[in-house]
Amino acid sequence: MDKELFEKSFIDSLNKNYPELSKYFDFKLKIFNELDTLIFEINKCLILEFHRAAITLTNHLLERLLKLALINYEVGIGPIPVDQWNSVFEGPNKKYGSINLGNSIDKCKDLEIITDKEHRILFDTIRELMRNGFSHADSSKTLAGLPDELIAFQGNFNKPGDINEVGLNQKVIPFLQALNMETFAKEASKPYFEFVFGLIFRIEKRLDERR
């Protein structure tokens, strides 16, 4: 593909989406400053309409957020002398650094870092549809609500009037799975990011209130 076509596509997407999404470049985190560049990267994906990339990166953002929330809950958010950083963070990082998403969601709920409603959304919806569907490339849960059978019509160039009806299971045929996942990503990438973006600030507020 010619470079000029890429440039036009990028510029068209930028002009179309920047007015709505530029607000996600204008924020200030108090606790989770290390998430700044990741948020910027996701928003750039959304602006350029890289929806599957945005979802996969938002999955990463969410998992990292919950681990950091647990670490900061244990360590506290007050100042720590630099010469104590190793000893202070070593234990919590070992404890939570490798925790899986389901366990981190449950643990955050137990510690009231997230609410019951947030727990339900994260555990029952996001964990299944977003993380498994994109980070794990398992489309079964994401496409579960679609009908098993998609009616297609097969023609014959040698017999233009000869058209056969064929029932196709769009949940198991790879290229139909891909088309449906692409459609899902276009619809879900922005609302998903917006939810996680808001969750970051809600968790920061709760941690700050424990100070």
Image (spheres, rainbow, N blue to C red):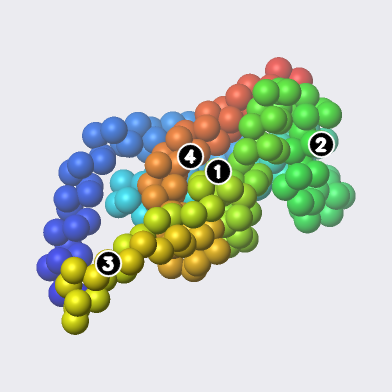
- Labels 4, 3: front one: 3
Task: Report how far apart the C-alphas of labels 1 and 3 lie in the structure.
Answer: 29 Å
**Residue 129 percent across, percent down from the top left:** 59, 46
Name the mark on residue 145. Answer: 1
Task: Report how far apart the C-alphas of labels 4 and 3 lie in the structure.
Answer: 44 Å
Residue drawn 62% across and 38% down? 125
Mark 1 vs 3: CB contact within 8 A: no
Task: Report how far apart the C-alphas of labels 2 and 1 lie in the structure.
Answer: 29 Å
Residue drawn 55% across and 43% down? 145
Name the mark on residue 107. Answer: 2
Decide: is 210 above or below 32: above
Answer with left or right where residue 108 lies relative to residue 174: right
Task: Report how far apart the C-alphas of labels 4 and 2 lie in the structure.
Answer: 22 Å
Name which of mark 4 and mark 2 comes first in the sequence: 2
Mark 4 vs 3: CB contact within 8 A: no
Residue drawn 39% across and 50% down? 183
Front residue of this view, candidates 37 and 43: 43
| Total numbered labels | 4
Amino acid carrying mark 2 in the image = Lys
Crowdedness near tag 1: few (<14), some (14–19) or many (≥20) residues, C-alpha within 10 Å: few
The quarter of the picture where the C terminus appears is top right
- Labels 4, 1: front one: 1
Where does label 3 land, which residue? 163
Decide: is 70 above or below 209: below
- Labels 2, 3: front one: 3
Task: Report how far apart the C-alphas of labels 4 and 1 lie in the structure.
Answer: 22 Å
Name which of mark 4 and mark 1 comes first in the sequence: 1
Amino acid carrying mark 1 in the image = Gly
Where does label 4 land, which residue? 193
Name which of mark 4 and mark 3 comes first in the sequence: 3
Amino acid carrying mark 4 in the image = Phe
